[in-house]
Every structure is written in C-alpha cells, then in structure tokens.
Image (cartoon, rainbow, N blue to C red):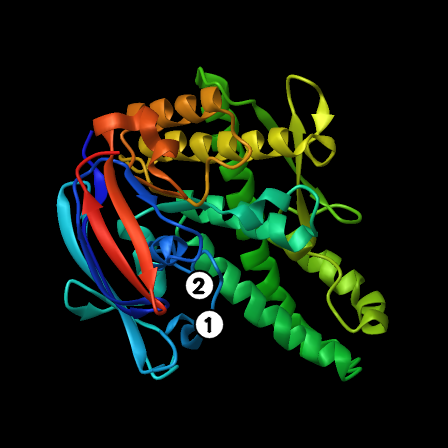
Amino acid sequence: MPGLFLSRLTLSHVRSHKSARLDLDARPVAIHGPNGAGKTNILEAVSLLSPGRGLRRAAAQDIARRPESLGWKVTALLQSLHQLHEVEIWSEEGAARQTRIDGKPAPQTALGRIARVLWLIPAMDRLWIEGTDGRRRFLDRMTMSFRPDHADASLAYEKAMRERNRLLKDQVRDPHWYIALERQMAEHGAAIHANRIHALEQLGAAQAEAQTAFPVAELDLIATEGEIPDTPADLAEALAESRFRDLAAGRTLVGPHRADLYGVYAAKGVPARDCSTGEQKALLVSLILANARALARDFGAPPLLLLDEVAAHLDAARRAALYDEICALGAQAWMTGTGPELFAELGDRAQNVNVTETDGISQINERPGP
C-alpha cells in the first residue's frame, strides 16, 4: 500500500522549539523526555498540517516562541500516496496563519486533500463526560478525515448561523430577513448531518471487521432535544418553525450544531460516560484505530496518528497490542511518553527521538533505538 508519512519536519520558533529538524522514514516515531521538555509541541506542529487550529486549538499568536513572539513556521516534506509535497504553515507577528503547498498559496482546507491526520491527547480522556461541544469536535474531526469538504460545509453553516443569531439578538421579526440565511443553513446543515452519518457508518464497519484487543464502541448521533432534520427541506422548515422560540432564546436552537455523539461499550452494554477511566481510554483508542483502518481503505493509506501520552491508563499488554496494531496498519504514529521504556515493545519497528529542555529551549536528539 502506498504510504502517507513525513520524511522531514522543521520547526522555527514554535513554542519551546527555537529551531529543530527531524529526518524520518515511514516507521512510527517514539518521542520521549521529561515533562515540559516540548514533546507535545512537536505533535502540535504536525497537527497543523491538517485543516483547523491543531490539537490545542490555539490561536496563531499563541504558537510563537516567547518572549520573542516574532512569528513561527512549520515546514514538512509529506509523502502522500505516490506524490511528495512540501507544505509550509507560518504566521508573522501574530497574524493569521498562512499555508503554502508545493510553493503555491493554498487554503487550509486544501491540506485535507493531501493528508489525513488523527490525534488522541490527554484532554480528550474526558470526552464522554464533558459537554457536547467536545464530542461534536471529536466527531467532526473524524468526519473531516473521510470527507474533507465537511470543513467547508461547517464554515458556511457557522457563518450563516452567526448572521441569523445576530438578527435574533436584535429581535428582528420580519421573516424576509431570515429566509435566505435559513436556506443556506439548511443546505449546508443537511450536508453536515449526512457527512457525520457516513463517518459513523465507516467507523462501525471498521470496528466490526477488525480483530483487536480494544473494545468496540457503538456510536449514535442524537439531538440534545427533539430530532435532527436530515434533508434541506426539513431543516429549512424546522428553522422557520423555531423562529419565535429562537427569538426568545436569542440563538438558533435547531440544527446539526445541537447534535451529540453517544457511545456505548458494546460488550458490556454500558454507556461510555459510565465506564471506568481505563475503559473510556480504551474506547477512544479503539475509535482512533477504527478511523485509521477505515481511512487506509478509503483514502488509500493510513493517516498520520498523533498519540500524546498514549500509554496513560493502558496496561503493558494493551500497550503492546496498540503498538502491534499500529505497525500492522503501517501508520506513521507520533507517540510521546516520559521514558524510552514505554516504547520498549516497539524495538526497531520505531524511530526514537529524545527531547530535552534547557533554559526554556527544547532540544531534539534522534536516537537509533529505544
């Protein structure tokens, strides 16, 4: 299977990294070092090679190394299927980030057409017990991995909804002001819903077909109240009918932005929110692996996987099983941990990187083995 991996990554003034370069092959990347050394900053840099704001959802000015705050740049050589791309992401003095692919300016959404990037970070461990916003973001990241145009539909929907909400807050009652906006929301909202359903179907199939040490999560898309209209006509009608209620609330109360991701530990029939911390972590790992397997079939290559402190809440047997699945999948997985012993089961199947920090500056040291 043709690959998807980074053969080079360079960082300039990215958080704690003043200047760094990694030359790589397609194997997993095991990054270890003490807490605060700058390991997660490397993963964040890789996450910027996908549409959106990266795994920390940081504003451009927050990524720049301090106290200089002069700007920052991430450059990567990306092997994508049978093509090699040079990707540059940068920001100057806090300005909006810019993207260049193969020397030409490009919108962020174009990144989703040449690469797929998935991540699992410690903040996501609370996915099943936090608010619905986090679960929607998690679902939309997975959805965007299958349908890159999902990002465009989401942006268009959000823009129209913001304008509609402005009318609602201003107590505008003339229906003529709403019709065009609701038509746009209905068109893009129905696409968002259909894309999410497609992603859940892909994940369900990938979990059902795999033999894995991680538990299967049954997923469903539910509305926080009522139902989610699934056609443009039905959503437009629901928005029109909800105007008076929305006027009282000052915001839009119906649509895909009110959806929630519901998960169940299939083997036990227990809602994910009621599972133990370890079980919740295992369910998340299962979903990321299922997403990666489905993408390997759909996109033609497994995605880049960013797994920050992935060993947390995983015992040695599950950790070894995770590494075996990653290697069998053929994914370039970027993993962090505090010590090389956490990656001992990988042996020479991974390339090892040690990260240290002195006086606020991170130093990257490539190592031949664990």
- Taking the image as drawn, is residue 255 in sight? yes
Residue 87, compared with residue 2, is above or below; it is below
The amino acid pointed to by label 1 is Ala
Residue 363, compared with residue 353, is above or below; it is below
Which residue occupies 37% across, 53% down? Answer: 39
Rendering coords of residue 125 (x, y %): 59, 43
The amino acid pointed to by label 2 is Arg
Say which quadrant the C terminus sits in.
top left
- Residue 53, labelled with which disc? 2
Q: Nearer the viewer, residue 52 or 173?
A: 52
Specify few, some or many for label 2: CA neighbours under 10 Å numbering under 14, 14-19, or 20 or more. some
Verify CB contact (< 8 Å) between mark 2 and mark 1.
yes
Q: Quadrant of residue 163?
A: bottom right
Q: Nearer the viewer, residue 24 or 116?
A: 24
Specify few, some or many for label 1: CA neighbours under 10 Å numbering under 14, 14-19, or 20 or more. some
Count the labels in the image.
Answer: 2
The secondary structure type at the circle numbered 2 is: loop
Q: CA distance from mark 2 to mark 1?
A: 7 Å
- Which residue is disc 1 drawn over? 59
The secondary structure type at the circle numbered 1 is: loop
Q: Quadrant of residue 272?
A: top right
